[in-house]
Amino acid sequence: MIDYSEPRTCGTTANNTRGRDLTFEDVLRFAGREEARSGLPPDVLTSPPAAATASCGSGCGCGSAERGFEGTGTAAAAALQRPVDRRRALGLMFGAAAAGSQAVAACSPLGGDSEARQAKVLEWEEYFKGNFRLMTGEEKSDTIRRLERLAELRTGRNVSIKATEATPGVMFGYAFNISKCKGYRDCVSACIEENNLDRRSGTQYIRIFEMEDGEIDFDHADAGYAHAVPAEGHFYLGTQCFQCANPPCVAVCPVGATWQEPDGITVVDYDWCIGCRYCEAACPYWARRFNWAEPDVPAEELNPNQHYLGNRARSRGVVEKCTFCIQRTREGRLPACAEACPTGARVFGNLLDPDSEIRWVLEHKRVFRLKEELGTEPRFWYFAD
């Protein structure tokens, strides 16, 4: 494991990388040679030629050539000529992740900027990590530690990223009281701040539609009104991710970057998303947002209380969505939108708890859901007093 706070440096490497950053080809070459060495007889590995133990000369003790950037002897050279099938090639490529981080940490000549050097190491390791669901507990801890350090280097703020799991016996649900919502949009502002949404593009997970009394008509509804509310002859209806029991967005993802958690929250592994936007097209409720540019959140406005599958930093070219404020709700708190609502129009709770407020609403009010005919079974209901 690399100590990110004390990166190692050296003046050169034995394959003449002085004055430039290590390339991906350098790393692959290193990984290939390490793989070749692993198949050599013990006497070759324990008694390398003198050229293979040369140091970089800067006193860092990295032994650059010994680490694979110089020849590893005749036996090693022969081993490197072995044919490699596709499966083995992929293994070598992904094995280069660890090699890359070690090589960059030891020998990347980034001058005296230790923070830039640390960031480069972290970014290398982040780039090659696996899907969150496939990580071990230790891998998750290492990943979170890297992300927290990267956030500090990039923003100057200390953040706390958790990976709190779903609580057994909990299935989250939401209800929206149309008769109480007055269109103030405090919920929208709270969501933007809580979930570190892009300020430049004005990304919103929640939209409040102003509709004329008498019918729900999204074709003629206005979600961008800029007048005093509530407006006479109108009512207000909010939308966001409805956390469907049968989410079509999950079914179309070609890489498994989005899935439904045991508590009903559909999440996205931002680092696994390839930005194909199939999920965005499949969602019938307009709940997914694509980052066309790098999200911009001023450091002083950053919410440091984060969840790996929620409001942590996202990048350009990936999809994100409402997660019922997973960083809050899995800690026993209300979503930011429900907490901020000044009229009590939003009801959130555990559908499996017979004494919860949302269960009372479902059992005592006339409720409906949008586009029920699609069979998505959204866990988001509307009702009126």
Image (cartoon, helix red, strand yellow):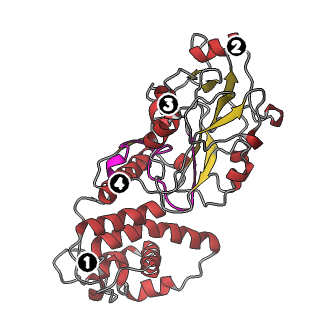
Question: Which residue does the numbered mark 2 point to in the structure image?
Answer: 365
User: Which label number is shown at residue 151?
Assistant: 4
The span from disc 4 to disc 3 (Cα, nearest Å) is 24 Å
In front here: 270 or 210? Answer: 210
In front here: 109 or 333? Answer: 333
User: Which label number is shown at residue 335?
Assistant: 3
User: Which label number is shown at residue 156?
Assistant: none
Question: Which residue does the numbered mark 1 point to in the structure image?
Answer: 63
Tag 1 secondary structure: loop
Amino acid type indicated by mark 3: Pro
Labels 1 and 2: the sequence-earlier one: 1
Q: Quadrant of residue 217?
A: top right
Where 294 falls versus 313 (above or below)?
Answer: below
Please give the range of residues in magenta: 299-322
The span from disc 4 to disc 1 (Cα, nearest Å) is 32 Å
Tag 4 secondary structure: helix
